[in-house]
Amino acid sequence: MIQDDLCCTTTGISLDKDGYPRVKWKNRLWRLHRLIFTFTNGVIPTDKVIGHKCNNKGCINPNHLYLTTAQQNSTDAAKDGLYVTGLNHPRFKKAVETSAAYQRYINGESQQIIADSLGISQSALSARFIRYKKENILEC
Ligand SMILES: [Zn+2]
């Protein structure tokens, strides 16, 4: 039985690149919270997304899910100080950029040349690489 106020999370279910539990249902991959929402509330309109009132991506408690627009969802998340995933998020872009830069470095380009091409200093690039290796920010 699901309690109203508690988050309901999963274990042993693989997560997609954005950190949402993902399952296969009727030959399609679903984010689990979207599937749960569909079961409990019906089909999700194509122009809508499912937000988490609790800000817990992994939560599948139907009482914590709500229908919203992608725009509103980003606004809510930003307001709540969350790390918003999405291709246009500045931090995501930076992570992708760092990952690509690191690949170039591994392939033998000098940090100075890479830094110049990104318009940043060599020391800034070096600091990014250290963080990148430590946090393994993103798998690309
Ligand atoms: Zn929750």
Image (cartoon, helix red, strand yellow):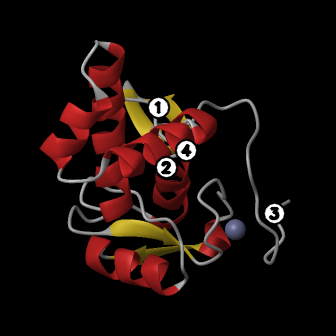
Mark 4 vs 2, N-terminal side? 2
Mark 2 vs 3, N-terminal side? 3
What amino acid is found at the position of numbered circle 1 in the picture? Answer: Trp
Disc number at residue 2? 3
Mark 4–mark 1 Cα distance, whole angstroms, equals: 38 Å
Labels 4 and 1 touching (C-beta < 8 A): no
Q: Is mark 2 within 8 Å of ligand 1?
A: no
What amino acid is found at the position of numbered circle 3 in the picture? Answer: Ile
| Residue closest to the eye, 23 or 41 | 23
Mark 4–mark 2 Cα distance, whole angstroms, equals: 36 Å
Q: Residues within 10 Å of mark 2 (few under 14, many from 20)?
A: many
Note whether residue 43 is visible. Answer: no
What amino acid is found at the position of numbered circle 4 in the picture? Answer: Arg
Mark 4 vs 1, N-terminal side? 1
**Residue at mark 1:** 25
Labels 1 and 2 touching (C-beta < 8 A): yes
